[in-house]
Amino acid sequence: MTLLRWILMLLCYYFPYLAFSQVEKTPPSKMEQFWDRFEFNWDVGAYYQAAATTNKEISQHPFTKRVRNLLLLYNSKQEVVSDNPLMHGTMYLGMHGKADIAPGYSVSIGLIGEHRGYSYGMYNTENIVVFPQLKGSMNDTVTVFNQDFRLSANLGYLLNVRVGAGLTYYNVDAQGFEVAFGWRHLQYQYIQYTDFALGYGLNEEEPRFHWLSLVDLSVNDHWTLEVGLGTRILQRFLTPDGEKQYAYMSYFKLQQAQKNWEIYGQIGYRPFDEPYPLFAFPGQEDIFGDFSPEWTDQSAFVFGASWEQLFGPVKWKNQLEFRYYGKTFNKDQISRLVVFRDQDNPNEYQNTVGDNLYPIRSYDRPFSQWAVFTEFRDRNVFGLTSVTEIDWNVFKNFYLNAVFDLNYLEVEQEGSKFFPFYTAAAAVRLADDLEIAFTFTNKAMNLDLHYHTYYLLDAPWYGYRIRKRLPADW
């Protein structure tokens, strides 16, 4: 009987497989070859938050609270969280396409639509926005005299940029271009972004960077090293004489790709020799008068590490950073021309789009960014940041997820403040990384400032999120 089963298996599986394997496969048609050049992807987010108690108070650093009281039209008292899309239920949907023009050359286009508050009405045009994203990319090699030269570039809308090791531009989006030329381990890179003073509250007209780096240096079988020297060209927005200033920088990145480990650092120096008056609140003039900067005031640095670990069903992602910005390095880097509410409307309710937009998906970014430190005008600032994400696959498609975004700021003459943001979620993950989650958080959108940031809630809020993220290589 056993022999008969084996014979039947051969007849039913092996011989048909053998026959079909010998058939010559039909080459793809021209139409199939054409469509193979295209890729499509999508991302979505739907969020809602509500106060778990009657407490809607927020926590601020004393310095920024006083400045905001003087300058803000909305939420000037800085005592309770202001109206924002997540309090009313909000969603966005992004549709993205990528076309390969030739090997190594591609064009990407995305169209994102947002409904910024269900409570505001189904078709409320003041809170429904649609915006495009366009990007061209190249990654090619040219051989000259038997030597390979690398060419790469990104042009257009650039998501979540990180310049160098992230001393200045990091955790933000940009428009502009990045071009790199490489030969063996040597690489030159030029970066130019469009006006951040009108798009993101950093007082730079068109920031430009020149980098000369050594890349992909082998340390051992597991680790590689990248080091670079560079210059940042600064032109403050609307300066009458178009005066340019320079900052000099160096960075390193020590990476282990197999485990997504990275140790990195960057230092910067911005010469500023002329004495100038420091910003002072009334009654502080005797503390802050005319000022001649020391080298420590003109310097900045970041040192950090990021890594991932897997403990059975638990994935653990970590990033730890120590930052310092001297008062002169950050001098005049703040721009309050960027507004996320309609300034002609005195009400904050149903007012979530101004001359600029705070995209819904930016809510998922970490708190730390350069604009946080530039708010402390004419003060030296230390920062310690720890971002940890714990993702536990409890059972099949059920996950428990927690993100702890902890930030400690020490400000010269103004004391310290701890910002312990957290978000806990119980989630069901469906196909294609789409998740539906119940959330518990102390982090709220802040539409009252000049950059994408958050309010720290005194008491946690509960809510839900439906989310699918766009892959990093898009």
Image (tube, rainbow, N blue to C red):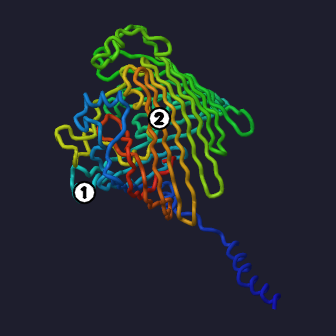
Closest to the observer: 97 or 150? 97
Residue at 28% of width from left, 30% of height from top?
A: 337
Q: Which element is circle 1 on?
A: helix
Q: Nearer the viewer, mark 2 or mark 1?
A: 1
Q: Residue furthest front?
A: 54
Mark carried by residue 8: none
The three-letter amino acid code for the residue at tag 2 is Tyr
Q: Quadrant of residue 412?
A: top left
Q: Is 418 situated left or right of 259 in this image?
A: left
Q: Quadrant of residue 144?
A: top right
Residue at 54% of width from left, 65% of height from top?
A: 397
Q: Is residue 368 above or below residue 326?
A: below
Work out whether residue 233 can be spotted: no
Q: Position of residue 469 (x, y in %)?
A: 46, 53
Residue at 49% of width from left, 35% of height from top?
A: 162
The three-letter amino acid code for the residue at tag 1 is Ser
Q: Is 231 situated left or right of 346 in this image?
A: right
Crowd band around label 2 with a 10 angstrom C-alpha radius: few (<14), some (14–19), many (20+): some
Mark carried by residue 119: 1
Quadrant that contains the N terminus: bottom right
Circle 2 is placed at which residue position? 170
Q: Earlier in the sequence, mark 2 or mark 1?
A: 1
Q: Is residue 419 above or below residue 90?
A: above
Work out whether residue 140 can be spotted: yes
Q: Is 150 situated left or right of 433 in this image?
A: right
Q: Position of residue 187 (x, y in %)?
A: 59, 28
